[in-house]
Image (cartoon, rainbow, N blue to C red):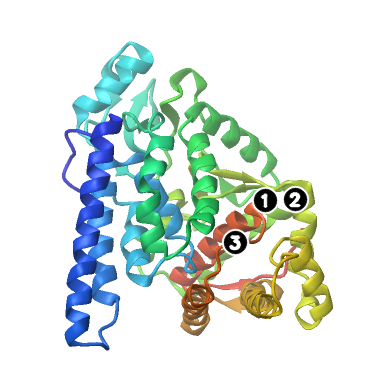
Amino acid sequence: MSEEQEYIPTSKVERATKFLKTGAKVGANYLKHYSKKIVNPDLSRDELDKQNAEDIFSAMSELKGSALKAAQLLSMDPNVLPKQFLEKFATAQYNAPPLSYPLVVKTFKEQFGKSPSEVFDTFSKEAIHAASMGQVHKAELNGQKMAVKVQYPGVGDSIKSDLNIVRPLALTIMRMNPKEAGQYIDEVEARLMEEADYENELNQAEEITQACAPLTFLTFPKYYRELSTKRVITMDWIDGLHLTEFLKTNPSQEVRNQIGQQLWDFYDFQVHKLQVVHADPHPGNFLVLPNNSLAILDFGCVKRLPADFYQEFIKLIDPTLINDDARITDLMNRLNFLLPNDTEKDREFFFDLFKKSLELFGRPVHAEKFDFKDPSYFTEMYLHGESVAKNKLKMGSKIARGPKDGMYIGRVYYGLFSLLHSMGATIDTKSKYV
């Protein structure tokens, strides 16, 4: 666990000042880079991206909340950020500096009118896990072990102002124009507003837990309403290893496949049976239990798929679609990937882009079995994203395309694929629920 943080800037002025200072650092990094490039025209952006990623992540870690969560969400999608940012921001998923205990006590007194020791029989003063929006403490009440998630001060109140301030930095690191970045930031804002409300998370957790009852191989914690508020949420403590920790034990290929299959079936069931999806697929939200089954944590970020979007999504994953250019064009028109005022050059470019993206996304989905440990697939996916970004810059594309719901569910699937890749799992990917 990282060194404890004694203070979080919560006022708009403090947080804006931190962002501005970070922006100045990024600007200085660019000046250094282009000065070196005068001497060495072949110099790549790798060093620049690495330094910018470190400076921006450091600031976001100190500010926590929406700033750090945005980094976590962006790190799920290989088509949005340069590689250096993906690697650095991914640590936001499970390794943020924890808050000091006095700040935890302050939150408890605001929410319950009592300190943690007055609410529980025992309560760990040090956080067991710390992430972007809050941290988890271990507690006990009447012999029952519990996990208590405490939200960082100011998180819920600073989302809109943070994202407005972070927008210029997002434009820089995502290499996007304002309209394109706006889609990502607006969608992140919607999810963050939900995730900052722990009463909403509790409702979503109970809804999905009940709906997933047929998936008997999964474990879900029980939640305690009487010990939860908008800023504190209490659930059963479950003994297990987060996926990252589990992989360090060097499990057999058979066990990797078994756990990976549970993960795949969980998402397949949610998308096609519920149209309600646990939308935060990162290692910190899944525990591997001693019997090699999965426990599912954290339902703050949930994506609901509108019926009309789901009907189009079903068509996108039809394996016969990739060989039918007329159907692809029709879908692109209906989903606003192709627009009425596009030139022939635009239509050709975006058709080729969409078809390649569709083929890459569909490769695991259309297979009977898919080996996620094969690095060539993920290399190809990353190189495609890099190519798209460079070509769109050359074309001067300034129009946001595609449905908002598609953008987010795409990130969910890429996050799932990345988890399965890190596990090196081979999965039966044919849907059981379509």
Q: Secondary structure at mark 1?
A: helix
Q: How many marks?
A: 3
The disc at residue 399 is: 3
- Disc 3 marks which amino acid? Ile
Q: CA distance from mark 3 to mark 2?
A: 34 Å
Q: Residue at x 58, y 49 (%)?
A: 218
Residue 97 seen anywhere in this rendered image of the structure: no
Report crowding for label 1: few under 14, some 14 to 19, many 20 or more residues within 10 A (C-alpha).
some
- Disc 2 marks which amino acid? Lys
Q: Are marks 3 and 1 in contact (CB under 8 Å)?
A: no
Residue 192 to residue 284: above or below: above
Q: Which residue is denoted by mark 1 in the rendering?
A: 270
The disc at residue 273 is: 2
User: To which quarter of the image does residue 57 belong?
Assistant: bottom left
Q: Residue at x 75, y 54 (%)?
A: 310
Residue 185 seen anywhere in this rendered image of the structure: yes
* Residue nearest the viewer, comparing 38 with 287: 38
Residue 97 to residue 57: above or below: above
Residue 109 to residue 139: above or below: above
Report crowding for label 3: few under 14, some 14 to 19, many 20 or more residues within 10 A (C-alpha).
few
* Residue nearest the viewer, comparing 284 with 287: 284
Pinpoint residue 238: horizontal percent, then vertical percent.
43, 41
Q: CA distance from mark 3 to mark 1?
A: 32 Å
Pinpoint residue 194: horizontal percent, then vertical percent.
52, 35
- Disc 1 marks which amino acid? Gln
Q: CA distance from mark 1 to mark 2?
A: 6 Å
Earlier residue among tags 3 and 2: 2
Earlier residue among tags 3 and 1: 1
User: To which quarter of the image does residue 302 belong?
Assistant: top right
Pinpoint residue 161: horizontal percent, then vertical percent.
39, 36
